[in-house]
Image: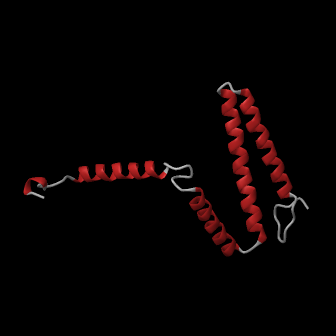
């Protein structure tokens, strides 16, 4: 490296720009793969680890029921919104399929809701 390659100084604004660019590049790379840049195995292992930590921390069957109910709710809402968008985009058949699946998820929620557990604040029993 020669002395001509070394800048006399760099402005704080330039450093902030470099940091913003690096952050954008990092975020863009994060979403490169099908699962936020992770393989299926990495994705599943990460979720399994988080679930194991939750079950260890809360150590009650209601933790699993609550997780399932919240997850089914999120899936149902996602399918409903997707179905609505398909109708808006003029693809009624696709919209119907997404909304049917939302209904299946709603039925799954009802089935889970009816399963009674100790100290269950959700159960219909």
The answer to which quarter of the image holds residue 54 is bottom right
Residue 75 on image: x %, y %: 70, 48
Q: Residue at x 72, y 61 (%)?
A: 67
Q: Outermost residue, top direction?
A: 90
Q: Residue at x 82, y 61 (%)?
A: 122
Quarter of the image with the C terminus in it: bottom right
Q: Eyeballing the image, is 101 above or below 15?
A: above
Residue 80 on image: x %, y %: 72, 40
Residue 45 on image: x %, y %: 60, 64
Count the labels in the image: 0
Residue 62 on image: x %, y %: 77, 67
In this rendering, position of residue 115 left or right of residue 36 = right
Q: Residue at x 71, y 42 (%)?
A: 79
Q: Eyeballing the image, is 119 above or below 39?
A: below
Q: Outermost residue, right direction?
A: 125
Quarter of the image with the N terminus in it: bottom left
Q: Residue at x 75, y 57 (%)?
A: 69
Q: Outermost residue, left direction?
A: 3
Snapshot colouring: secondary structure
In this rendering, position of residue 42 left or right of residue 118 = left
């Amino acid at each position: 490296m020669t002395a001509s390659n070394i800048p006399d100084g760099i402005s704080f604004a330039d450093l902030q720009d470099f940091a913003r660019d690096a952050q954008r590049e990092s975020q863009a790379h994060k979403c490169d793969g099908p699962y936020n840049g992770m393989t299926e195995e990495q994705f599943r292992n990460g979720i399994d680890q988080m679930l194991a930590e939750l079950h260890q921390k809360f150590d009650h069957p209601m933790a699993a029921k609550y997780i399932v109910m919240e997850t089914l709710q999120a899936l149902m809402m996602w399918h409903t919104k997707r179905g609505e968008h398909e109708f808006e985009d003029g693809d009624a058949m696709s919209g119907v399929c997404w909304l049917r699946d939302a209904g299946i998820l709603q039925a799954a929620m009802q089935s889970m809701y009816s399963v009674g557990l100790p100290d269950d604040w959700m159960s219909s029993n």
